[in-house]
Image (cartoon, helix red, strand yellow):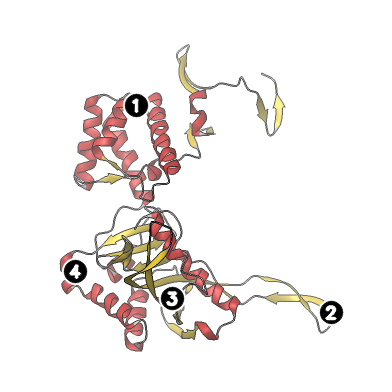
Amino acid sequence: MNQKELREIRRRIQPEHNSITHIYGCYVNGGKEIIATLEESLGLMTREEQEKYLALLKKVLSGALGKNLLDLSFATKAVMDGEEYKALYELRKSEGKDPALREEFYRRVIDHTDMDGENYLILLAFDSYDVPRHRKDGALDDSGQVYQYMLCAVCPVKPGKEELGYAPDDRRFHSATAGQIVSAPQLGFLFPCFDDRAANIYNALLYTRDTQALPQDFIDGLFRVEAPLSAGEQKNSFESTLSRSLEKDCRFDVLQSLHEQLGERIQLHKESKDPEPLTLSLGEMGQILENSGASAEEAESFCRSYEADHGKESILRPDNLSSVKKMDIATPEVKIQVDPKFSCLVQAKIIDGKKFILIDASNGVTLNGVPVEI
């Protein structure tokens, strides 16, 4: 899925825009025991309740593609014979109306979800979207394409804080507890994906709040597919491979130039409004390394090493590798954060045999917010 297709489905998750009739769910305690199940008619809810349930489900379509949202691809054999795929397909086909399929699904999620002993709520919803066709004159036609999909959210449930609350009966404030509060989802997914504005039964879109490490047990238990690297894993692998490849020649100016170039590409991609995520092949990354001052041998070493770890067709996402918001420069004692647009104001120098980080202070300096003179 690309960003444009994601926004199109997100816009549906509102009371007046979707055809969701029921919200299904299962409340689970820290011991993996089912406390309660729910089957609520959306039409019988108050507007406020509708919005709260839908907001939780909508959250699993939020975040950045390649970070919080990851494409999971089923192999043809898994689609034909896979137990996990069949369970998802049959549940989606039933639109949640089969209690036995729901129960089987809940149990699968419970068996493969670790919430560190917290209670949590599994939410399920099913929607059918009559995908319109956009005419050149801006009008919409019926394309005849119906996209049927399911959304799942796994939300931690935490005790509410004890606070003061007003009691109208005696016109006084008393200690009050909000009870059990459903938090934003920690995990979730959309199945199947909405690719080229149609159902792609070979893909699911995984949501994870934690971008550093993927919920591998959850992925294995529900999808049984080879998962991509998480954003954190890709960054760590990139930095480790880069450090090994450049070895003693991992110079300040090379890394500075590398992150400047990655930042420029991220910014240009953002300005282009291209809905497809920005990616780089290993060959493109090797060229950027050479343009940053690395030797051809070092760039080739990086590509070979990364390919050995992650495969020849590896792609890298610059926004997982570099930030357009800050550049961190640190020694064991001091840490400096620099806006990447102004990284040129920072230099590494050797003066009288000592190594220094120099910052151009021509435009003034403040110390704890107070302007000072140098």
Q: Residue furthest front?
A: 137
Q: Separation of disc 2 and disc 3 at Cα? A: 39 Å
Quadrant housing the N terminus: bottom left
User: Where residue 54 sits in the image (x, y, percent)?
Assistant: 50, 72
According to the image, label 2 marks what residue?
171
According to the image, label 1 marks what residue?
292
Q: Earlier in the sequence, mark 1 or mark 3?
A: 3
Q: Separation of disc 4 and disc 1 at Cα? A: 43 Å
Q: Separation of disc 1 and disc 3 at Cα? A: 48 Å
Numbered circle sitting on residue 78: 4
Labels 4 & 3 near each other (Cβ < 8 A): no
Q: Amino acid at mark 1?
A: Ser
Q: Secondary structure at mark 3?
A: strand
Quadrant housing the C terminus: top right
Q: Secondary structure at mark 4?
A: helix
Labels 4 & 1 near each other (Cβ < 8 A): no
